Image: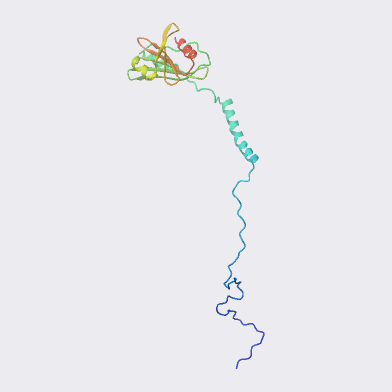
Amino acid sequence: MEPAQPADRVPADRTPPDGQPPVDVPSGPGGEPAANDPTPPPPLKSGKSERSPKDMAISLLVLLVPIALLLAFYRGFLGGDEPTTVDPAPAIEQARSANVFPVSQPQGLGSDWSTVSARYQTVEGGANLRLGYLTPEGRGVQLLQSNVPAERLLPAELTSQGQPQGPTELGGRTWQLYTARGNQQALVLLEPTRTVIVIGDARDNELRELAGSLR
C-alpha cells in the first residue's frame, strides 16, 4: 500500500485537460493560444542626406579651387591660350626644290599672325603647298598654291558653293573673290602654271592682307 500524498503538493504533470491551453501560455478571447507580441524593431533611419545647402556649397568649392589653380597655371606658365606654331620654311623649301610651280610666301605680316600648319605634298594631277595661319583676330586662313588644273582644284577646295563675286586688285595682281563653304570666302589668283587660293572664315580685310603680302 502506497503512502498517502500530502494534500498541498502540486502535481508534477501540468498538462491541462483536453481542449484547454497550457496554464502558463496566454490565451485569446476564444481560448486559443495568443500570438507572441515581440518588441517592435526600432524605426529605420532615412537614407536622405541631412547635409544643408551650405555644406554642399563648401564641398563644391573645395573641388573647384584646385581646378581653378591648375587652369591658371596652365594658362599663365605653360601658355595654354597660345596657338601651337610651326616653322613653314621646310615645306616651302620642299616645294621650291620640286620646281613644279613658282612658290610665293608672305612678307611683312605682323607678329600677331601665327603659322599653325605647313605641308607640301604631291597629289593626283599635281602638287599642293598648304600653309595655315591664325589671324590677329583669332580666325583661320589657309594659303594654297597648286598646279592642279583649276577646273578640278576649285570645286574640290571651294565645293559646289563656290561662286565668283568679281575681280579685285591686290599687290599688283588681279584676284577673283569667291564664296566658299559655310561662312568662308576666298581670294583666287589664276596663273598659267599655278593657282593660288586664300580661304578662311577671317574678315575680308585679313584675307586681303595675306594675299597682298605674297612675294
Residue at 58% in and 33% down: 67
Quadrant including the N terminus: bottom right
Q: Quadrant of residue 157?
A: top left
Residue in front for this viewpoint, 29 or 134 = 29
- Percent across and percent down for residue 203 are 49, 16
Residue in front for this viewpoint, 21 or 4 = 21
Quadrant including the C terminus: top left
Residue 91 is left or right of residue 71, and the answer is left
- Please identify the residue farthest to the bottom as the structure is shown: 1
- Percent across and percent down for residue 112 are 53, 16
Residue at 38% in and 17% down: 128
Q: Is residue 103 visible?
A: no
Q: How is the image coloured?
A: rainbow
- Please identify the residue farthest to the left as the structure is shown: 125
- Percent across and percent down for residue 86 are 47, 20
- Please identify the residue farthest to the front as the structure is shown: 30
- Percent across and percent down for residue 156 are 37, 20
- Please identify the residue farthest to the top as the structure is shown: 172
Q: Is residue 174 visible?
A: yes
Q: How many marks?
A: 0
Q: Quadrant of residue 158?
A: top left
Q: Quadrant of residue 5?
A: bottom right
